[in-house]
Amino acid sequence: MAVIGLTVSSIVAFALVQPPASNMGPVGSLSWYLIESSDAIAEVGILAALVGIHVRQSPSYGRLGTAGFIAAFVGTACFVLSTVIWLLTKTDGMFLGILFSSALLGWLVGFPLLGIATLRARVLPRWGGL
């Protein structure tokens, strides 16, 4: 689901937005709504994938994996929340900036920790940890 959402978002950005414009078109345009809603669907898919990985590996990857999962999950949930709020309000604000920054921090900390724990647990193939 995440791959499909990001693919649709990229195709819409490539097909509907002219090169001199921003990468999403003007805020509130059809292309902007299509791109942002596809991104929100992809982010929900990432949440589902994280839960699946956690359920599969939780007995094996210990505290490091649990901490990585929590950080990555909270970061992705912040991304979903910021995308949905932006879709509904169409305005950037300090709250959305803080939410987006905390989402990035969650991803930058959580996904590497989860990858290391996945490699150490040896439950999933090695490429899953990479």
Image (cartoon, rainbow, N blue to C red):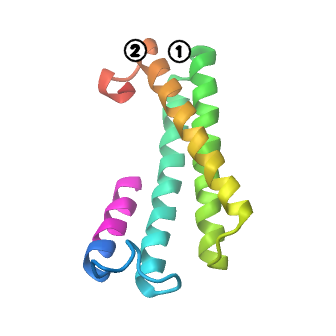
- Is-magenta flag for residue 65? no
Image x and y of residue 61, in percent: 54, 16
Left or right relative to 16: residue 68: right
Q: Secondary structure at mark 2?
A: loop
**Mark 2 nearby-residue class (10 Å; few <14, some 14–19, many ≥20):** some
**Mark 1 nearby-residue class (10 Å; few <14, some 14–19, many ≥20):** some
In this figure, which residue is indicated by the disc labeled 2? 122
Q: Are marks 2 and 1 in contact (CB under 8 Å)?
A: yes
Left or right relative to 84: residue 115: left
Q: Quadrant of residue 20?
A: bottom left
Residue type beneath disc 2? Arg
In-front residue for pair 51/21: 21
Residue at 35% across, 27% down? 130
Q: Quadrant of residue 18?
A: bottom left
Residue at 65% across, 76% down? 91
- Vertical relation: 87 (above or below) 110: below
Magenta-tinted stretch? 1-11
User: How far apart are labels 2 and 1 at the CA level?
Assistant: 8 Å
- Is-magenta flag for residue 3? yes
Q: Quadrant of residue 81?
A: bottom right
Left or right relative to 12: residue 85: right
Image x and y of residue 76, in percent: 57, 48
Image x and y of residue 25, in percent: 41, 80
Q: Secondary structure at mark 1?
A: loop
Residue type beneath disc 1? Ser
In this figure, which residue is indicated by the disc labeled 1? 60
Most frequent secondary structure within the magenta stretch:
helix
